[in-house]
Amino acid sequence: MVIGVLGGMGPQAGTDFLSKLVAATPFTCEQDHLHVLLDSNPKVPDRNRAIAAACGRPLPCFFNQ
């Protein structure tokens, strides 16, 4: 199983999430941890500006870049 994480809400948010994921994962050795791919993309449009815009969603802007 692979868990994919789309980041971009700030680098600290990605590291915070991974720390919480590791803490919540039961393991007895390193190989028991989950396979995680984190794409921390700082180019995700500003959520606050998207909320204030007509559509209010940053996702359409993300795919148009």
Image (cartoon, rainbow, N blue to C red):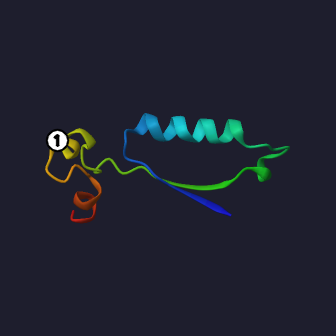
Q: Position of residue 21 (x, y in %)?
A: 63, 42
Left/right of residue 43 with respect to residue 41 in the rendered view? left
**Residue 54 in the image: above or below residue 23:** below
The single residue placed furthest to the right in the displayed view is 28
Query: Residue visible at 73% across and 50% down?
Result: 33
Q: Quadrant of the N terminus?
A: bottom right
Quarter location, residue 39 = bottom left
Query: Residue visible at 19% across and 54% down?
Result: 55
- At numbered mark 1, what does the secondary structure look like: helix, strand or loop? helix
Query: Residue visible at 81% across and 44% down?
Result: 27
Q: Position of residue 25 (x, y in %)?
A: 73, 43
Residue denoted by label 1: 52
Left/right of residue 30 with respect to residue 63 in the rendered view? right
Q: Position of residue 9 (x, y in %)?
A: 37, 42
Left/right of residue 33 with respect to residue 28 in the rendered view? left
The single residue placed furthest to the left in the displayed view is 54
**Residue 33 in the image: above or below residue 1:** above
